[in-house]
Every structure is written in structure tokens, then in C-alpha cells.
């Protein structure tokens, strides 16, 4: 499965964006937590916010990015891209997981006798 590398890189912050210091502070505070989830409907500025944070205080942190679309609802495709995004942080990350994910799957056998 070919990887579209454009899905793996955060778009740069646009200079015409309205600064949102309260939200970028919220993102920065999230670094002290195990997980920060940014979940909003399409078009509400999630990418713009992360781009703004990244251009400022977020420059010193490593960041894995994945842009999702409808086709990523397929579990194999989603995991492939998820691993590829994490692999942008270090080259050897996810090699064995990717190989396992794309290895041939054994066929399921029907049981030869009832289990009840």
C-alpha cells in the first residue's frame, strides 16, 4: 500500500491567522498529561490551532501528525498510516509492526466438531 506522505506532515501556520493564546496555552498545558485529545467538527480550526502552537511554543517538541479522511476508516489503512506517522519521529519505529500488519493472514478453519 503506497503511503501519501502529505498526510504525515502538519501544514505550516498561516500568517493571517487570528492568535488564540488561551487555546495554545491549553495545548501547552496538555504536555503534562498522558493524553490531550483535540476533537471538534470539521472546519473549526483544529489544524490551524496545532499549527499555531507548533510555530510558537511547540517548536521544541517532537510531533507526529496524521491527517485523516473517510478512507482511513479501514483498520489496516488507519494502522498503516498511524505507524507511518510515528515512524517520522525515528526511522526504526514500527518496522516490525508494519511487517506484521501487512503479512498474509491465515485462513480461518471451521471447527471439525461442535464445541458444545
Image: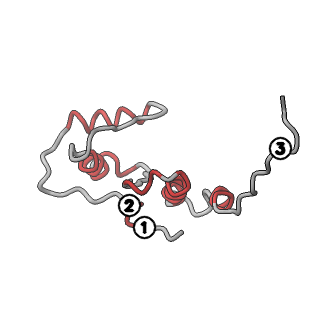
Bin the neighbour count of mark 1 within 10 Å (Cα to Cα): few under 14, some 14-19, many 20 and up. Answer: few
Q: How is the image coloured?
A: secondary structure
Q: Secondary structure at mark 2?
A: loop
Q: Residue at image x 21%, y 43%? A: 44
- Relative side of 108 to 65, left or right: right
Residue ranking furthest to the right: 113
| Mark 1 vs 2: CB contact within 8 A | yes
Q: Position of residue 19 (x, y in %)?
A: 15, 44
Question: From the viewer's perspective, is the residue at label 2 or at label 3 nearer?
Answer: 3
Q: Disc 1 and disc 2: Cα gap in Å?
A: 7 Å
Bin the neighbour count of mark 2 within 10 Å (Cα to Cα): few under 14, some 14-19, many 20 and up. Answer: some
Q: Disc 1 and disc 3: Cα gap in Å?
A: 43 Å
| Front position in the image: 18 or 77 | 77
Q: Is residue 111 above or below residue 116?
A: below
Q: Residue at image x 23%, y 56%? A: 13
| Front position in the image: 51 or 25 | 51
Q: Residue at image x 28%, y 38%? A: 40
Bin the neighbour count of mark 3 within 10 Å (Cα to Cα): few under 14, some 14-19, many 20 and up. Answer: few
Question: From the viewer's perspective, is the residue at label 1 or at label 2 nearer?
Answer: 1
Q: Is residue 39 above or below residue 98?
A: above
Query: Which residue does the numbered mark 3 point to in the structure image?
Result: 111
Q: Residue at image x 48%, y 68%? A: 3
- Image quarter hosting the C terminus: top right
Question: From the viewer's perspective, is the residue at label 1 or at label 3 nearer?
Answer: 3
Which tag, 1 or 3, sits closer to the chain's start?
1
Q: Position of residue 68 (x, y in %)?
A: 38, 53
Q: Position of residue 70 (x, y in %)?
A: 38, 54
Query: Which residue does the numbered mark 2 point to in the structure image?
Result: 9
Q: Secondary structure at mark 1?
A: helix
- Relative side of 83 to 68, left or right: right
Query: Which residue does the numbered mark 1 point to in the structure image?
Result: 5
Amino acid at each position: 500500500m503506497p503511503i501519501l506522505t502529505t498526510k504525515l506532515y502538519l501544514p505550516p501556520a498561516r500568517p493571517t491567522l487570528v492568535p488564540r493564546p488561551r487555546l495554545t496555552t491549553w495545548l501547552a498545558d496538555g504536555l503534562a498529561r498522558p493524553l490531550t485529545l483535540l476533537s471538534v467538527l470539521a472546519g473549526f480550526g483544529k489544524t490551524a490551532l496545532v499549527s499555531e502552537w507548533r510555530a510558537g511554543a511547540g517548536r521544541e517538541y517532537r510531533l507526529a501528525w496524521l491527517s485523516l479522511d473517510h478512507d482511513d476508516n479501514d483498520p489496516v489503512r488507519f494502522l498503516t498510516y498511524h505507524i507511518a506517522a510515528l515512524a517520522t519521529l525515528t526511522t526504526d519505529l514500527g518496522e516490525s509492526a508494519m511487517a506484521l500488519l501487512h503479512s498474509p493472514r491465515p485462513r480461518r478453519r471451521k471447527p471439525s466438531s461442535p464445541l458444545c
